[in-house]
Image (spheres, grey):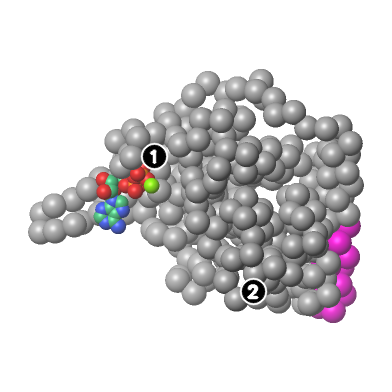
Amino acid sequence: MSSPALECIDVSKTYVIGKDIEVKALKNVSLKIQRGDFVSIVGPSGSGKSTLLHMAGTLDRPTYGRVMVDGVDVTKLSENELSAFRKNKIGFIFQFFNLLRNLSAIENVMLPMLLSKRYTVKEARLKAVYLSKLVGFPEDRLKNTPNKLSGGQQQKVAIARALANNPAYILADEPTGNLDVSSSAEIIATFKLLSSFGNTIIIVTHNVELARVTNRILFMKDGHIFEEAPRSFLERIPMEEESIKLKKKIQLDLLNMERENVERLFKSRLMSGETYDRALKSIDEKELVIKQ
Ligand code: ADP
Ligand code: MG
């Protein structure tokens, strides 16, 4: 049995905001998110959603309790270890996209791959093109900088970027919060597609439509977390059979690129045998989900 993508064990977070004044933002939260889960976190403002997301993103440490990402206890890692770990293990998506303004769309997607040093420029560029196709970003805009893109297009770039290093999961904080209705619908459809390909996705949202397409809804209130009964994908977003077929092909091509990449790294001794075996196994698992 492989470890969950994310596990919070009895996590509490207390902010000290003044002499003898404390805010208990999270209270003994325990939570398991399995690989392939598509989760939304909803709840009133101030209930602790962002705090939980910060824990899941290893951006902040709990006051008590443990956070396990892909089987690794991140509460035991040093700041340096954590920053490297975070870059390769977690994909972030924000309400205001947070793209680098001076880089083109494709360069924004390539950057995390180049920083990880796992990809050559050529590999990173090819993978970025495929990721952009996967999320439905228009190919003729790849060289545009963010200010020459619509909000929906910028968010697609951000999603492609979040996928770049094959994260254990994607964390999104209000990803449709700054989008019009039709762009929101496209982004929702994109998340749903990515989920059907086995990606693990965790989204904080006020968007009811978005929460509805996820298969787990976690409700936060006053620092506690409650789970709604598991649900199936009852709410369907229509998608053309042809489009799904094409996207499947793109996703399978991406996995083949990944295979070639780890083979190159292993052969040039940049990757240990153990990591190589694990990477191949994970690629095979993903392929199985897509071919189902
Ligand atoms: P949500 O995202 O659900 O609106 P948050 O996780 O942002 O809730 O906040 C939960 C509680 O913790 C709130 O009472 C908030 O004021 C408090 N809080 C959040 N971040 C901080 C911080 N950095 N310092 C002090 N208090 C904070
Ligand atoms: Mg918040």
Residue at the farthest left position = 19
Inspect the magenta stretch and tell me whether residue 114 lies in it: no
Side of 26 where 208 appears, left or right: right
The spot of residue 53 in percent (x, y) is: 45, 49
Specify the principal SS of the magenta part: helix
Disc 2 residue type (three-letter): Leu
Mark 2 in CB contact with mark 1 (< 8 angstroms): no
Please say whether residue 118 is visible from this viewpoint. yes
Q: Residue at x 70, y 75 (%)?
A: 114
Q: How many marks?
A: 2
Q: Earlier in the sequence, mark 2 or mark 1?
A: 1
The spot of residue 121 in percent (x, y) is: 79, 77
Q: Is residue 43 above or below residue 50?
A: above
Inspect the magenta stretch and tell me whether residue 264 lies in it: yes
Q: Is residue 80 above or below residue 98?
A: below
The spot of residue 156 in percent (x, y) is: 66, 53
Tell me how far mark 2 sits from mark 1, CA to CA.
39 Å
Q: Residue at x 68, y 71 (%)?
A: 104
Q: Is residue 271 above or below residue 44?
A: below
Mark seen at residue 103: 2
Identify which residue, 165 or 35, lies in the foreground: 165
Mark seen at residue 29: 1
Image quarter in which the N terminus is found: top right
The spot of residue 128 in percent (x, y) is: 76, 64
Identify which residue, 214 or 85, lies in the foreground: 214
Q: Residue at x 68, y 38 (%)?
A: 189
Side of 242 where 208 appears, left or right: left
Q: Residue at x 44, y 61 (%)?
A: 59
Q: Which stretch did the figure color magenta? A: 256-269
Side of 169 where 53 appears, left or right: left
Disc 1 residue type (three-letter): Val
